Amino acid sequence: MPRLDPSVVGRSSRLRARGAETIGRALHIIRTRHGSFTVGGGIFLAIVSALILSPWLSPYDPNAQELLQRLSSPSTQHWLGTDQFGRDVLSRLLIGGRFSVTVAAATIALSVIFGTILGVLCARAGGMVDEVTMRIVDLLIAFPDVLVALFLIALIGPGHVALIAALTVVGWTPFARMARSLALEINAKDYIMAAEVLGCSRSFIIFRHVIPNAYRPIAAITFLRFGHKLITVGALSFLGLGVQPPNSDWGAMLADALRFVERAPLLAFSPGFAIFITALAVTLIGQGLEAEVKPRKDQRESILGTESPSEGEETMKA
Amino acid sequence: MDTRDNPQANLPRSEAPYLVADDIVKHFPVRARGSKRGDLIRAVDGVSLSIRKNEVLGLVGESGCGKSTLARLLLKLIPLDRGTVSINGRDISEVNGEELRRLRRSMQLIFQDSLSAMDPRMRIGMSLEAPLAQHNIGDHEERRERVLRILLEVGLDGSYYGRVPSQCSGGQLQRVAIARALLLEPNFLICDEPTSSLDASVRAQVLNLLIRLKSRFSLTMLMISHDLRVIKYFCDRVAVMYLGQIIEIADRDVLFTNPAHPYTRALITASWLEEIDLAASGATVRGEPPSPVVPPGGCRFHPRCPVAEDRCVREAPTLEAAGSNHLARCHFRDRHVNPKVIKSGSGAR
Amino acid sequence: MTSEAMNRHRHPSSTTPLLEVEGLSIGSSEAEVGMVVVENLDLTIGPGEVVALVGESGSGKTMTALSLVQLLPAAFDIKNGSIKFDGSNVRAMTTMQLNKLRGGRIGIIFQQPQAMLDPTATVGSQVAESLRLHRGLDRRAANARVIELLREVGIPDPVERARGYAHQMSGGMAQRVMIAAALSADPNLLIADEPTTGLDVTVQTQILELLDRQRRERRLAILLITHDLTVVSSLADRVAVMYAGRIVEEGPIRTVLRQPRHPYTQALLRCSILEARDDQTLYSIPAGIESVGEISRGCRFRPRCATADEHGISEQCERQEPEFADYAKDCRARCWAVAPFDSPLQG
């Protein structure tokens, strides 16, 4: 990309060039990013657009029952057929998806924000605060989030808000760990000290130096966890603990459809596939982001002409 | 003479020094596996020195001797445990918050690794403008002008403005770092091994640049290096550090012709590698610097010293006169031995 | 071995070469980029001989070293040339043969040794893994040998150190460990890429002493790669100076360092010793516009060369790449300003 020499170029052409450069950079990102990122990103973008536009896209009212049409196969009127109450599956999928994706997204968003802030604060504080918090994190990570969610929902009752709360309670922990380790690593960097020597304020250093250098790995695990959460939300809704009737989401739809799986397999397949493809899309995004953050270990092994270190490790234990 | 080292000992009476460090101490708790509570790394263990205006003081020592920690203490990047640092007569422990931030303009630091000293995600132009903005210097247009001017001053053209650090070589980045430090118009510049990771030809260029800028901006400097060749070219006075203590300090020519401490002699010999006969090594120092957690008893250098005697194991020497304007921390400082090598090629002045 | 015999082995001018490189060219793998990193390079190392390959960043010295054991990064290929180690064609070797060669008959050490050591494995285990692979020793024998090796390279408390980890060591000590690992299979050739760069001066002399002792005791040939001419003089027998992918001067160390003929070598030497001019500024090599990697006619050093103008041969330097001129016994320089020593022009 050609570099502009600002001493030579005039102001308005600089602004125009800046705009062109931004578009150029966007295209550059699409061209050079890891394949997973673009594919996953494309799919996810399509799904989210469809969900956002669902009130206009859905051909029917998702709750409108047409009993004469119950359990019909896909047709020109009902692209994905109808359910046991004659409701259009496609419309229900589009509207229901909003709940599924929103609950998962809300959970992740809260987890990231809370976890990251806590992690950065721990790194900053050090000492007992850091120690204690990290022990708590270690403890919470040991619990499978589904079980904790079940337990909490048993206490507070079902519903999509309850689901968000229950899943966030343990969901923040991996972010805290990662944010803390990143903060420690970055704070030790020379350019942070250089900024301090230059007299930059604390907030400048945090917002302009630390965060821009830290967000990439955090973004990667955000998307990976997002995929995981979608499935978890699906599973908990399937158990009836999520969105309550008359609202429905993909997991609930799947639960309803099981009774009719022989007569109308598409009824169960549609929400299942929806969960699957959305989770896959965000996981691909996460993997694409992660691929850019990985270090290389191969060179060392080839120099010593050896394969894995574990073989040597056993030698010394003798 | 009392046992506390007199930081003024090297100066002519009339001049007030720019910077005075008086018996400063910094210990770090050890956090490694297998260490006991209360173990301390004695990074800086009672250092006193002073720097006159427009003078270049060289600070020499091996890795782990505490020279980088000393630099950070002088700039108040880390807090002192004991002692005082005064800039222009003012004790900097009294300077805090906003006032400290503003004081930072006058004291800058060049790092050894020029790449890690730059935010990898920030363009160079931005990295240079940001400190100006933080100190409310000029408006946006004016800041860019200054940046472009200083880039030219250090020998880089305007194209560097838009570059990212990964697109520049080590030498170019070091120039950028120097430009960034000078933008704030400091009085005092600490260079922490500025040329150690550079190629020979680039090293010469950067040193030439620093010399030129030093006189142009009337800088007072502290030049830290483990390479005595660089120190010899660049500095007016030299302090040698070992395990957290100053073990010798003198005017440059005195130090290189008449080093009083065996460690200094060894460093001088080791710095002129082309003169060394490897098979017949004698003046080189044995072993590695010991742990700064438990420094050896008596003279800290005695386990590696080619001329150590019983007295050295029992009794720790103090920094005492070994000549005019020449202090050394050795029981045998009066036994002057010319090091094997003082080649031609005088220094910068 | 008697000291006489050892002396003979120190200067093996008549024996068959251990390493023979002819016409080596390395460039980027992608055709469009077309970057040439090393061009038509010849290099010979005899048994027990120390050859220094000196050049600054971008000269191609590291690429040359990596190509000798087929470890070029994916972005680069050997375009041309032959590499023979003890008579065998390295370029034709299978992966298995190469794995045996690396760490076996050819040991390799790099700069920043701590980056090369696995932080999660003990130091001893890493030296041992090389032993087990190349020497087929069992655990007990390998352990014992590791301690011996660590002691040989001057590490105090070798038993303690073997149980420790890389991050607990200083740079100098880590480099000793790397040397121990590289020497564990008793190689004939050691490739040392900037082994002392970044280390304290006192540690540098110690490492060089160690290498010197090892090569005398084991009759080890060393390819010493560095940008620092001063490091070279204490250890090497011969030196080859590289610039922009080509060797521009080579010969016995004393001759070349005492009276370098190529303008780049002269300039590099002055820079390395921080020689000052009359006005007290340091000698440095003028910038010039470097077109490293692009194929250009004429001498690569021309944009930065003051000698061309002095001798009035600028036109020739720009028109044609200089050939090697032998200016003394076993010494040659690639420069139009250097007259061959058997020519009537010798001054």
Image (cartoon, coloured by chain):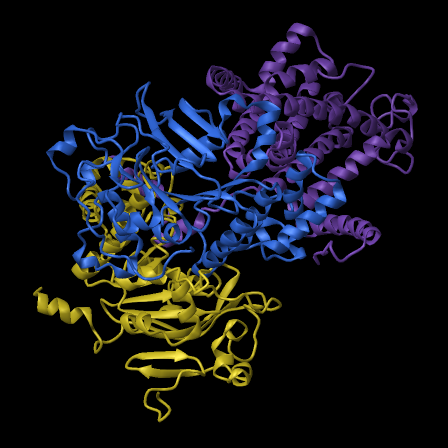
Chain colours: A purple, B blue, C yellow
Q: In the shown orientation, is residue A102 left or right of residue A224?
A: right
Pinpoint residue A248: horizontal percent, then vertical percent: 79, 20
Would residue A63 be found to the left or right of residue A110 on screen? right
The foreground one among C104 and B148 is: B148
Camera sees residue A116: no
Q: Quadrant of residue B159?
A: bottom right
Residue visible at 14% across and 69% down? C7
Q: Position of residue B193 (x, y in %)?
A: 43, 46
Q: Is residue B338 left or right of residue C78?
A: left
Quadrant of the image occupied by residue A269: top right
Q: Residue furthest top?
A: A155
State whether residue C283 is above or below residue A109.
below
Measuring 51% from the left and 74% from the top, which residue is drawn there? C300
User: In the image shown, does A242 or C223 lie closer to the viewer?
Assistant: C223
Residue shown at the point (37%, 45%) measured from the top left? B237
Can you name the residue that lies furthest to the left here?
Answer: C2
Closer to us: B153 or A276: B153
x 36%, y 68%: residue: C90
Q: Nearer the viewer, residue B199 or B32?
A: B199
Q: Position of residue B319 (x, y in %)?
A: 27, 33
Q: How many marks?
A: 0
Q: Quadrant of the N terminus of chain B?
A: top left
Identify the residue at the far bottom of this view: C344
C73 in relation to B53, above or below = below
What x and y, as percent, mark residue A215?
A: 63, 34
Name the quadrant of the C terminus of chain B. Answer: bottom left
B101, above or below A157, in the image: below
**Residue C116 appearing in the image:** yes
